[in-house]
Amino acid sequence: MNRFLTERNLDLILSLALLMLFVPAFLPLINIDKEWMLYVYAAGAIIAVISRILQRATYRKDKSMPLRVRRLKHIEFWSAMCYLVSAYFRVSDPYHPGNWIAFLLAGAALQVYTSFMIPYQLKKANDNKKEN
């Protein structure tokens, strides 16, 4: 893989994408609603999906990763897909906010779940290796 696309850089790109998602989602709550925020939101969703796809390419090569962690990584990818569906609903139908907010919250819930479970499962797998 390219030297630029390391795991750390992909995490930074993903963090930027998530900021591009959550800032335009928060600003209408304080009565700042501009047309350009829709496009920032959509760009953040697209960047998040691309980042997750590139991360999948790195961990698919790693066969030493436990199966449970690989499944959690797949869930992270689907959280990014929830963001993409949310961006679609936000751009195509801005007058019904329930749809895009539901997908945004679903993606965020998956993201939070995996962010706690991946380190836990990696620690558990390392402890099992040390015992054997």
Image (spheres, rainbow, N blue to C red):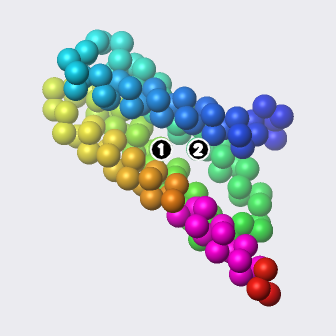
Q: Amino acid at mark 2?
A: Arg
Q: Secondary structure at mark 2?
A: helix
- Asked if 27 appears above or below 36 in the picture, the reply is below
Mark 1 vs 2: CB contact within 8 A = yes
Answer left or right for 27 relative to 113. Answer: left
Asked where in the image residue 83 lies, by quadrant, the reply is: top left
Give the alpha-carbon distance from disc 1 to disc 2, as whole Å: 7 Å
Asked where in the image residue 71 lies, by quadrant, the reply is: bottom right
The furthest residue to the bottom: 132
What segment is highlighted magenta in the picture? 117-129
Answer left or right for 58 relative to 32. Answer: right
Q: Which mark is residue 52?
A: 2
Locate residue 47, reporting x and y percent.
54, 31
Q: Amino acid at mark 1?
A: Ala
Q: Which mark is residue 4?
A: none
Let me know if residue 34 appears in the view: yes
Q: Is residue 126 magenta?
A: yes
Locate residue 20, reporting x and y percent.
45, 26
Taken as a whole, is the magenta stretch helix, strand or loop?
Answer: helix
What residue do we see at 66% from left, 69% from top? Answer: 123
Crowding near the residue tagged with mark 1, few <14, some 14–19, many ≥20 C-alpha atoms within 10 Å = many
Out of 63 and 29, give the one closest to the viewer: 29
- Asked if 125 appears above or below 85 in the picture, the reply is below
Q: Which mark is residue 80?
A: 1
